[in-house]
Image (cartoon, rainbow, N blue to C red):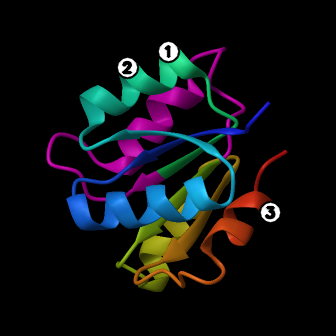
Amino acid sequence: MKTKIVVVDDNANNLLLEKDLLLMANFKVFTAMNAKDALLTIRREIPEIIILDVQLPDMSGTEIAKILQDEIETANIPIVFVTASVLPADIDQLLCIPNSAYISKPINTRTFAKEISSYIK
């Protein structure tokens, strides 16, 4: 069975690129472009990992992560934040969230799927 991943990004180009790279690596990929759709998709699919943009139009990625941490079904799903914001304070805030990691944008298309695989339990 393929590993399920939910990718959340409000930028259609980034979302398509990440989705295509993961599909080529044989993952089953679900996508969302905002927090509301992300939470619905994550709760429905219960993926093995979540790839989450930090800045979304309706809620921040860190807020989504905190909501998921409080729910039994989703509390242990690893979250990889993908962000262009790589200031030390921002990174510290992301890594304070249990079970999280980050990848900076622009992503490396050659290594992205392998990096994501390394965070799956």
**In the picture provided, is 39 more to the left or to the right than 46?**
left
**Residue depicted at x 70% and y 36%:** 48
Q: Residue 72 location in percent, x, y?
A: 66, 14
**Is 55 included in the stretch rendered in magenta?**
yes
Q: Which mark is residue 118?
A: 3
**Is 51 included in the stretch rendered in magenta?**
no
The one of 96 and 12 positioned closer to us in this rendering = 12
**Residue depicted at x 47% and y 60%:** 20
**In the picture provided, is 6 more to the left or to the right than 12?**
right
**In the picture provided, is 48 more to the left or to the right than 69?**
right
Work out whether 101 lies above or below 10.
below
Whether tag 3 and tag 2 are in contact, CB under 8 A, the answer is no
* Label 1, label 3: how far apart the Cα atoms are: 24 Å
**Residue depicted at x 68% and y 45%:** 78
Report the residue marked by disc 2.
40
Kind of residue at disc 2: Leu
Kind of residue at disc 3: Ser
Which stretch is magenta?
Answer: 52-78
Kind of residue at disc 1: Arg
Q: Residues within 10 Å of mark 1 (few under 14, many from 20)?
A: few
* Label 2, label 1: how far apart the Cα atoms are: 6 Å
Q: Which mark is residue 44?
A: 1
Work out whether 67 lies above or below 9.
above
Q: Residue 16 location in percent, x, y?
A: 34, 59
What is the secondary structure assignment of the residue under circle 3?
A: helix
